[in-house]
Image (spheres, coloured by chain):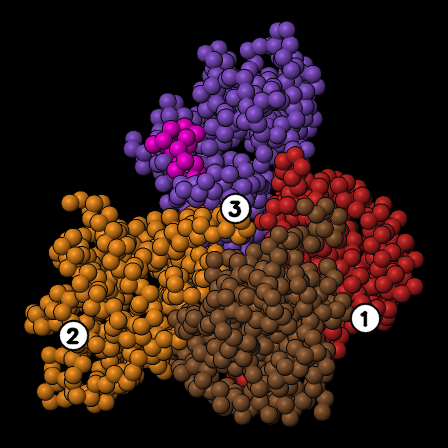
Chain colours: A brown, B orange, C red, D purple
Amino acid sequence: MSLRAKLAALRELLDQDVLALEPTFFAHGFSAVAGDLDRVRPKVRALGLWTPHLKDGPAALSLVEHAHVSEILGRSPLGHYVANCQAPDAGNMELLLAAGSAEQRQRWFVPLAAGEIRSCFAMTEPDRPGSNPTWIDTRAEPTADGWTLTGRKWFASSADGAAFAIVMATTDPEAPPHRRASLFIVPTDSSGYRLVGNLATMGDAGDGWASHGEIELDSCRLPADALLGARGAGFRLAQRRLGPGRIHHAMRWIGIAERSFDLLCERAIAREIAPGAPLGAEPVVLGWIAEARARIDAARGLVLSAAVLVERDGDGGASKEARIAVALVKFHTVEAMELVVDRALQAHGALGMTDRTPLAWFYRHERAARIYDGADEVHRAAAGRMLLEARGLARR
Amino acid sequence: MSLRAKLAALRELLDQDVLALEPTFFAHGFSAVAGDLDRVRPKVRALGLWTPHLKDGPAALSLVEHAHVSEILGRSPLGHYVANCQAPDAGNMELLLAAGSAEQRQRWFVPLAAGEIRSCFAMTEPDRPGSNPTWIDTRAEPTADGWTLTGRKWFASSADGAAFAIVMATTDPEAPPHRRASLFIVPTDSSGYRLVGNLATMGDAGDGWASHGEIELDSCRLPADALLGARGAGFRLAQRRLGPGRIHHAMRWIGIAERSFDLLCERAIAREIAPGAPLGAEPVVLGWIAEARARIDAARGLVLSAAVLVERDGDGGASKEARIAVALVKFHTVEAMELVVDRALQAHGALGMTDRTPLAWFYRHERAARIYDGADEVHRAAAGRMLLEARGLARR
Amino acid sequence: MSLRAKLAALRELLDQDVLALEPTFFAHGFSAVAGDLDRVRPKVRALGLWTPHLKDGPAALSLVEHAHVSEILGRSPLGHYVANCQAPDAGNMELLLAAGSAEQRQRWFVPLAAGEIRSCFAMTEPDRPGSNPTWIDTRAEPTADGWTLTGRKWFASSADGAAFAIVMATTDPEAPPHRRASLFIVPTDSSGYRLVGNLATMGDAGDGWASHGEIELDSCRLPADALLGARGAGFRLAQRRLGPGRIHHAMRWIGIAERSFDLLCERAIAREIAPGAPLGAEPVVLGWIAEARARIDAARGLVLSAAVLVERDGDGGASKEARIAVALVKFHTVEAMELVVDRALQAHGALGMTDRTPLAWFYRHERAARIYDGADEVHRAAAGRMLLEARGLARR
Amino acid sequence: MSLRAKLAALRELLDQDVLALEPTFFAHGFSAVAGDLDRVRPKVRALGLWTPHLKDGPAALSLVEHAHVSEILGRSPLGHYVANCQAPDAGNMELLLAAGSAEQRQRWFVPLAAGEIRSCFAMTEPDRPGSNPTWIDTRAEPTADGWTLTGRKWFASSADGAAFAIVMATTDPEAPPHRRASLFIVPTDSSGYRLVGNLATMGDAGDGWASHGEIELDSCRLPADALLGARGAGFRLAQRRLGPGRIHHAMRWIGIAERSFDLLCERAIAREIAPGAPLGAEPVVLGWIAEARARIDAARGLVLSAAVLVERDGDGGASKEARIAVALVKFHTVEAMELVVDRALQAHGALGMTDRTPLAWFYRHERAARIYDGADEVHRAAAGRMLLEARGLARR
């Protein structure tokens, strides 16, 4: 089956099997739909689109091809889960492949890629800015036979129910800033590891995969082989994880924008504001629709171009050109998505505020898109600086 | 005590007794704080600021003076409740005073103004646009000794726990559009009246005063004296209710913006993005602060000017000048509020997404501000048209 | 030579021979540089990029290839002229090819394509909205042996020095609106044709090619073969001319944006705001640079995609898909261009207001981009309507 | 006559005598209208509104009262000139009053306030950022009997025809930054002083009062009493001059916005986009009108509030509260003005690009408003910093 055909089938599958679960998800949380979602997963696998982010996985897609898959999955908050390419597991799989030992890959990657377990990534700390990943308070002290970790993390997405966490901790406080931290694989049943709870964000603590955990590490003892990658490589590996992560998010945001665009158009056609007068006859609304279409298509082009660069220049976007492209995509796509979601919600009037469409969910939870994986302001300044450096501005 | 002194005391009271209740409210709903709020109410009464929206109430304030009170109360989602000037009760009190018979005022206004009961206003219908209040499906049929109401309403805010609803229903379908509907006082224990449930908005069905109800009227029988005001006066009375309501909302939005501005500044001062480097040293953030300050002060000026006009020209903003001013205030103030809330949330990073500040609540629930009491697009077009008519454009 | 190599050579040529003429052009008008420009033209011809908009011309480029050429030419207000693809001649050449008789092509197209004469297009009228091309006051009355034209036109760009004008006039006032007008080829030495003068726009009446003429047709007598295309086909042919014209403009705007981006970056690197502190170290300026880069790249993608569609579906963008794409490109690209020009000008401070850079010229004269070839508001509404019709909204 | 009556008379005078001169001014420059303007001046004097910026002048207005006068004058680019309160003379008068010796005031202030001579202010330098007034290359060396000035200035507005320039030059390069420069009164017939020419800005070098000069000081010898104010006080005095200057500009911008608003409304009413269909029936245009009205009124309120603070706290806005208010007004009012001018121009279509309305002039020349007297970005950051300092952020 061609990719085009697979994409059509995936879209069909999503429309049939996943969208109907959204109201239950919004009202009762992830657990209430987890079983149903698990029954959809084999169908995605059968389509050949399982773990589509893994180049050497069963789907064997290029990054650009994955972008098209991700856009379709992004149409629903539950989409990526059914293909087992949901954050943070997708990034963790990539990280384990890139930096894990053969044993680590066997023990953690294999069941993760099979969808048998879930995981989380614990980097951000309540008292330290997420935008500065060189400033990590959590400490990992070497012991005779391993490590002891102490600290507090939050916004460890999907920690609830995770089998393991990848934790970033300072191992070498006297090293240069980018060499101070290391990554550790921490089974969640380790002594000293505790999920304090799920953070209420936008009024909702969530549960299971759809949650953001606060984690306490209280002299958490780990064996020597808990170290993932080289000592001091934490920052580098986290960046390597985040680079493709940003582009994965952008692909998903295009999907959100497309779903919202569809809802906007459907509403404009179906809703009468006076007998016989559809909302879609209003010039202001027509302007929203045109603007939305232009922004989505323009943003998609930028995402796909960045994907080409990332693919050409290697994982993690090692080249400056690729890093610039990823930074631009990060903030530009969010802007387009926010605009379309906002206009679609507005066109729905009071209905837009309810959970009878996914718009209110997109509106409130994707507000985080301008914050996670680096605040947009940080990406703007960084991209600007790289663009000037490429033209000869001396680095500060 | 001067009004200035009262305002300072009110601010103090809010800071001491109400802000601390917000986390519980966000996590557990209105019922969890209702008792505490009821214990704050006597303190507001003692301050002489009880029902500050009622010109002839104990506070005896002008509309401009009320604006200052409302701004302080608006700093918390729970503020207006402690002064018994919360929507929709405030508007219902005004409506009963304006259009109610002596008996109706005695039976409903008196306990409402005393804070002994709550009420709701049921106009919007799921299948009809809120922006077109001349198109109401709910029917009120005259009977031998009264009326029978049939229809469905939603976004009847605070219906949960209300003692009565003021319901808009079509009584004269053949009359000119603005004469078709009438208002009815419907005790919530009437047979045929049913609160179907609270609508989940932004992921939260809420409870008690902090909820939006869906109501079914199934051959709900009412006595003849259930009619509020004249038959066919429903549209006119609703507009009369909404006019001051819009300016009340705008006053409250200024308070939300000021609270958010304080949080933005406090975060900018307290948060370090690198050791020794406060967020508030960043030019981008300084620009947000300056922009926020300018927008709030400019918007407040517009609100106060509109209040002067409304006061001068009578209740309901009968003059075109006052109606234009109210329409401008509606959309202009929302814009300022949204900008400040957004920047403050962004400055808080991940913390901004949590319910540990009120920013996430403001962000998600006040999104409705561009929708309720007339979508902003409707007010823009209406204000533009009135401005042109004032210069001679022929009415269509 | 590959197209890539040709493009590099064209860029070099522009940088060497054309940019240096800009200050003289800004200070003394087109005549002061016309001779120099004419000496550059053979070099472009030698490069094989002469009349690059003509598919069957010497350059033999696809529309997408032409877009790349046009982007480079667009870097200077004088760029398109040296390749003889400047408006309005480019569109007139296409129109003559599409609708002209063999004799008309021989007499007018051949010297025009050779760069020996210039032309203008006279459609817009002072008292009629440019956005409504079905409402044309200029009348063409049939006579025994031809036509008599009477009316007034303005914004006939480049009328000053033109050998002929293509004039749109109403021939059949009782026909359906889109069948009322016809096109005429009017030699500028015809009796009854008079160039009233060049319109001062943005303080500058301009001259020669760089001007906008006001034209009076006072019983201007024309032979029968002055009619271009079929009688009543004026509207259809004008639209056919404007479709590609809009995409040509958009390609040029990308060039303007790129030139402005270069100036922005150069200024950020070179300008110190305090000793040793370049402007480009300011986060706000870095943000402009990043934003500009993202917007340009996203807009270029949209333009190229539209070019593909127009090429696929035939001249004039006959398919609805192509027409939507062209409309989106029209307003989206202008927005990106305006943003970059504005930020670049701002970064130059007082210098930006002078004519020592082309930024002030771009700023004031390209303000017209949101107006000509259909106001952006018209394109937004039209695109929105076509998008909804494609989804089933009934046509009004 | 009450101020209200005077304002009405001034408005009438402007409408009658000044607006008609604009087309000539746009087409032929200031000299072409100077004589006519001089004939209007006595009428303003007769109205009692001559030099309205001078508290102790014949008008004897408070700053708030002056704001109302300035708003009316601002309706035309020629307005302030007829009341002799045009920049840069208005600021120079204030400076001479504040810092001049009795002799300096007699020699320069008296004829300036009488409107007999004009002047200019020469601070900005081509190679130094206008946003950093502590970095001045022009040097003033003490001599036996006075000073020798050497350097180059530009954007010395109205230098063409000025009787004297107030020049800022470094006298003490080793002093702390804010103490390095001093001000000098330089008669324009001094040897060594040369007006190199008028800068072409936005395509127009202008002439007379409506121009921006480039000045060369080549060992320009001055007597000892050329020093204005204390040695080293240049920065302080320039700031003192600029503070009220910023608020004067803001008042004028409100006038520009009001004029543009009138033109927008008139066009919306008068222009038909199809037979019988006025532009003003379009919801998009109605939205512009409403938005414009709200922005102007909100901005005016901010300007008037700032004027109250400046008046309360002394000239130059000595208090931090007043300085914050002035900075906010600077960027906020520009934004409102730009929006209204832009929408009004757009509503005029092609006509908006011509000089048949003042909109194109406002559009291109008032683009400088975001640059002069400190770029808006500088004011935003400064206001943000002062706002945080007022809340306890340690000064850097």
Q: Which residues are magenta?
A: D310-326
Question: Left or right: where does residue B90 sit relative to residue A178?
Answer: left
Question: Left or right: where does residue B76 sit relative to residue D82?
Answer: left
User: Can the viewer see residue D313?
Assistant: yes
| Residue B392 drawn at (x, y percent) | 38, 56
Between D254 and A247, which is closer to the camera in this rendering? A247
Label 1 to label 3: alpha-carbon separation: 58 Å
Seen as rendered, the residue at the extreme top is D144
Q: Which mark is residue C62?
A: 1
Tell which subunit mark 3 falls on: B
Question: Left or right: where does residue A86 sit relative to residue B194?
Answer: right
Query: Few, some or many C-alpha atoms within 10 Å of disc 1 (few <14, some 14-19, many ≥20)?
Result: some
Are the numbered discs 1 and 3 placed on the same chain, yes or no? no
Kindly identify the amino acid type of the residue bearing the numbered disc 1: Ser
Q: Quadrant of residue C149?
A: bottom right
| Residue A189 drawn at (x, y percent) | 51, 78
**Total residue callouts:** 3
Which residue position is annotated with label 2? B228
Dominant SS of magenta comes to helix
Kindly identify the amino acid type of the residue bearing the numbered disc 2: Leu
Label 3 to label 2: alpha-carbon separation: 64 Å
In terms of secondary structure, where does tag 1 sit? loop
Which residue position is annotated with label 3? B276
| Residue B351 drawn at (x, y percent) | 45, 62
